[in-house]
């Protein structure tokens, strides 16, 4: 027996659509033409049997941190938005407290505590080489550092003071490569003074081997 199209739709559970458009209440009116329905008739939410997570996405910018620090470095070069000036010797180095405290535990403790330096615009950095301080400020923004034999000890001493463990580690390994019968005793004494136990042990063992 032939089944009428309307009966076939009802048997399949297909809702009947009346011509006209919705008045916003979900009921179709007799005005207009075609089969225009309101959003209320076709909600955007997924059916109950569909995973609701399919309507959500998580986005992460691949180079977000790199681009952000690059922008901060440009502010440093242009001396814009700087909120602190570090003074070492006769050199004044402008910087941003947020960047310094993000990299250095020394500055983090200084800027987040109640010490007087926390609110000072200019901070005197005693016992630190001006060039080494500048190199480490640059490192805070770029993550790059140039190691040289004639400045490595000043750089390591400054890194120890500012509590930069990554820099301390690379400086110590650099000095290990420089060990020579002519300097091993001096490097061992320097490592002991800075509290770099691994470097001191390596230098000590080196002195015992020759």
Image: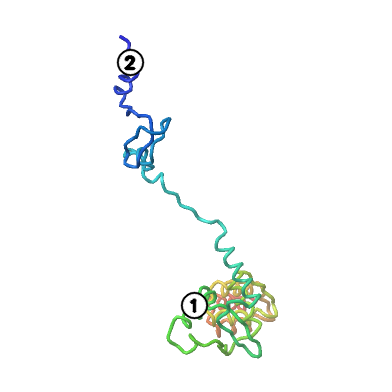
Q: Residues within 10 Å of mark 2 (few under 14, many from 20)?
A: few
Horizontally, residue 60 falls left or right of residue 37, namely right
Alpha carbons under labels 2 and 1: distance apart: 80 Å
Please tell me which residue lies in front, 152 or 203.
152
Please tell me which residue lies in front, 167 or 14.
14
Nearer the viewer's eye, disc 2 or disc 1? 2
Q: Position of residue 109 (x, y in %)?
A: 46, 81
Residue in the picture at 54% in, 74% down: 99
* One can see residue 185 in this view: no
Q: Secondary structure at mark 1?
A: helix
For marks 2 and 1, the one nearer the N-term is 2
Examine the image and state in which quarter residue 166 appears.
bottom right
Horizontally, residue 192 falls left or right of residue 175, namely left
The residue at the far top in this view is: 1
Q: Position of residue 197 (x, y in %)?
A: 52, 78
* One can see residue 127 in this view: yes
Numbered marks: total: 2
> In which quadrant will I find the C terminus?
bottom right
Q: Is residue 161 above or below residue 23?
A: below
Q: Is residue 127 above or below residue 78?
A: below
Q: Residues within 10 Å of mark 1 (few under 14, many from 20)?
A: some
Q: Position of residue 116 (x, y in %)?
A: 47, 90
Q: Position of residue 190 (x, y in %)?
A: 60, 84
Q: Is residue 37 above or below residue 60?
A: above
The residue at the far front in this view is: 31
Q: Secondary structure at mark 2?
A: loop
Residue in the picture at 48% in, 78% down: 108
Q: Are marks 2 and 1 in contact (CB under 8 Å)?
A: no
Please tell me which residue lies in front, 180 or 55.
55
Disc on res. 105: 1
Residue corresponding to mark 2: 4
Examine the image and state in which quarter residue 69 appears.
bottom right
């Amino acid at each position: 027996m032939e089944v009428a199209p309307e009966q076939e739709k009802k048997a399949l559970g297909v809702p009947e659509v009346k011509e006209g458009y919705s008045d916003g209440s979900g009921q179709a009116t007799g005005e207009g033409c075609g089969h225009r329905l309101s959003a209320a008739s076709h909600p955007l939410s997924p059916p109950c049997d569909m995973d609701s997570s399919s309507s959500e996405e998580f986005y992460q910018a691949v180079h977000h941190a790199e681009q952000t620090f690059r922008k901060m470095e440009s502010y440093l070069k242009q001396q814009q938005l700087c909120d602190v000036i570090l003074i070492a010797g006769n050199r004044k180095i402008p910087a941003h407290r947020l960047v310094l405290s993000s990299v250095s535990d020394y500055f983090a403790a200084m800027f987040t505590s109640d010490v007087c330096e926390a609110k000072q615009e200019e901070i005197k950095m005693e016992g630190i080489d001006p060039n080494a301080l500048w190199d480490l400020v640059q490192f805070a923004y770029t993550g790059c550092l140039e190691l040289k034999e004639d400045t490595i000890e000043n750089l390591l001493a400054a890194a120890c003071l500012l509590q930069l463990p990554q820099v301390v580690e690379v400086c110590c390994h650099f000095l290990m490569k420089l060990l020579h019968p002519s300097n091993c005793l001096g490097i061992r004494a320097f490592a002991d003074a800075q509290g770099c136990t691994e470097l001191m042990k390596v230098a000590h063992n080196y002195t015992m081997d020759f």
